[in-house]
Image: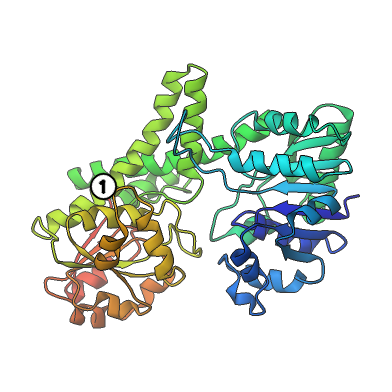
């Protein structure tokens, strides 16, 4: 039975996952380590509402276990040394250099973790891949660990996460499935069973699937590719709906009632974002290309092409509607996070819509209930097309949505925060320049109500 778990990486996967394990397994000491001192300090903040990741219900779970059997620390070596099971949950971004640039996963952080574990470990360890990784990464990790020369034996497991940000706590407490991949040897199967025993504290046995390592690694990429494909498919139809007079919401409802298709991920929007979909599909494209499967690669790459097109199309429509120029015009952005109920902004559609409008000399004013000015400017500064001084002069971030909309030529809804539906839209209309436009990139607001007030309202696909 496992008594001591270490997780390397205190981000969107490691933090919530370990908090749930600690809550459900009070007999296991769980230590989350990270070299980022600021992040660890936030996880340890006396005011638990200040933890670095916003997920509904997460702060309460952290408060319950923190200091009892859940710990956050920068002492990586100490945690590795003490742990019997080590989760690797570090970032695996898309490469920005060298072979595979723009598509392949950058595994330098994974390799650094493996080398650190190899250097520190004095006793046998089970190493669990939690980060999203390309197929056969486990063999590279095992190769590093098995050639340390210190006699320590390692078992490598793949345990991909299937969390949806905004519902991560719910997904962890009642998962559709938990997937664990391991070696077929006796030692490998014993390691698999030890991890099964951890999850069995709250997950029904029939929801825990065991496979070989390669199937587990590929399942994560495939799941995200299929989900993103549905988004791009309905978004492709949204443009056709606009040209033909159809309503994409009605089309989505009609096809979603087909039991063979289902209704999930059929909501047309300005495009998908987040840390997983684009990165994982590009990774899948690169893997297919590396095996010479060019038609397979082209098929999946089209999902990304459609998503990028949808974001550009949304921005172009704003410009066209505002009399073919947004130069000097104030555009209010409601929402910056890539989806509601999270403060994650990675690959958010808002970043790219803002970039496009700023290049046309628009003035962008932003409100998001969970994303601050520092993060918004960082997201824009990170783009190769932008520079820091232009972003600071072209973008303002306010904590009051009514002030953000004041004297604006148009509003763009970029995140589906529920609070946007509760606003006093008559008050917002009265404060805007006329005609007052709303571009609803999430099909969130009530069209009839807003048009009755006087807004010129446009949504995706209708």
Lateral position of residue 117 relative to residue 407, left or right: right
**Could you tell me which residue is drawn at 73 percent across and 32 percent down?**
144
Q: Position of residue 10 (x, y in %)?
A: 64, 58
Quarter of the image for residue 46 reads: bottom right
Q: How many marks?
A: 1
Q: On the image, numbered disc 1 is attached to which residue?
A: 312
Q: Is 85 drawn above or below residue 402 in the view shown?
A: above
Quarter of the image for residue 377 reads: bottom left
Q: Which residue extends farthest top? A: 292
**Could you tell me which residue is drawn at 61 percent across and 30 percent down?**
135
Quarter of the image for residue 215 reads: top right
Q: Is 181 drawn above or below residue 316 in the view shown?
A: above
Lateral position of residue 383 relative to residue 136, left or right: left
Q: Position of residue 232 (x, y in %)?
A: 38, 41
User: Is residue 462 in view?
Assistant: no
Q: Nearer the viewer, residue 416 or 108?
A: 108
Q: Is 70 drawn above or below residue 217 in the view shown?
A: below
């Amino acid at each position: 039975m496992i008594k001591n778990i270490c997780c390397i990486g205190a981000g969107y996967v490691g933090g919530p996952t370990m908090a749930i394990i600690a809550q459900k397994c009070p007999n296991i000491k769980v230590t989350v380590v990270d070299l980022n001192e600021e992040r660890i300090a936030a996880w340890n903040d006396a005011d638990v509402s200040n933890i670095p990741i916003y997920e509904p219900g997460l702060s309460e779970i952290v408060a319950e276990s923190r200091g009892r059997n859940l710990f956050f620390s920068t002492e990586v070596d100490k945690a590795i040394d003490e742990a019997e099971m080590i989760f690797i949950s570090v970032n695996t971004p898309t490469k920005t250099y060298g072979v595979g640039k723009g598509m392949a996963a950058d595994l330098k952080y994974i390799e650094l973790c493996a080398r650190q574990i190899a250097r520190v470990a004095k006793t046998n360890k089970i190493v669990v891949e939690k980060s999203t990784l390309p197929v056969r990464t486990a063999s590279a990790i095992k190769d590093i660990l098995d050639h340390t020369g210190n006699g320590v034996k390692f078992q490598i497991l793949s345990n991909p996460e299937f969390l949806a940000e905004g519902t991560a706590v719910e997904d962890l407490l009642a998962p559709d499935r938990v997937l664990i991949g391991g070696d077929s040897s006796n030692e490998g199967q014993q390691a698999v069973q030890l991890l099964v025993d951890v999850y069995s504290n709250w997950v029904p046995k029939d929801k825990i699937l065991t496979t070989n390592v390669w199937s587990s690694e590929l399942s994560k990429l495939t799941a995200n590719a299929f989900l993103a494909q549905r988004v791009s498919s309905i978004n492709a139809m949204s443009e056709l709906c606009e040209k033909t007079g159809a309503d994409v919401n009605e089309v989505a409802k009609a096809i979603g009632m087909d039991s063979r298709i289902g209704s999930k991920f059929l909501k047309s929007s300005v495009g998908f974002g987040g840390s997983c979909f684009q990165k994982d599909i590009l990774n899948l494209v690169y893997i297919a290309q590396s095996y010479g499967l060019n038609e397979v690669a082209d098929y999946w790459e089209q999902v990304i092409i459609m998503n990028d097109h949808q974001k550009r199309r949304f921005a172009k429509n704003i410009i066209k509607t505002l009399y073919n120029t947004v130069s000097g015009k104030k555009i209010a952005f409601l929402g910056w996070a890539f989806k509601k109920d999270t403060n994650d902004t990675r690959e958010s559609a808002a970043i790219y819509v803002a970039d496009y409008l700023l290049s046309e000399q628009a003035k962008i004013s932003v409100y998001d209930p969970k994303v601050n000015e520092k993060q918004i400017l960082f997201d824009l500064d990170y783009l190769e097309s932008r520079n820091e001084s232009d972003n600071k002069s072209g973008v303002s971030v306010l904590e009051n949505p009514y002030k953000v909309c004041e004297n604006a030529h148009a509003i763009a809804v970029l995140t589906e925060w529920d609070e946007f539906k509760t606003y006093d839209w008559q008050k917002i209309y009265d404060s805007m320049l006329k005609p007052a436009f709303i571009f609803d990139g999430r099909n969130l607001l009530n069209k009839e109500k807003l048009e009755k007030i006087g807004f010129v309202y446009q949504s995706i696909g209708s």
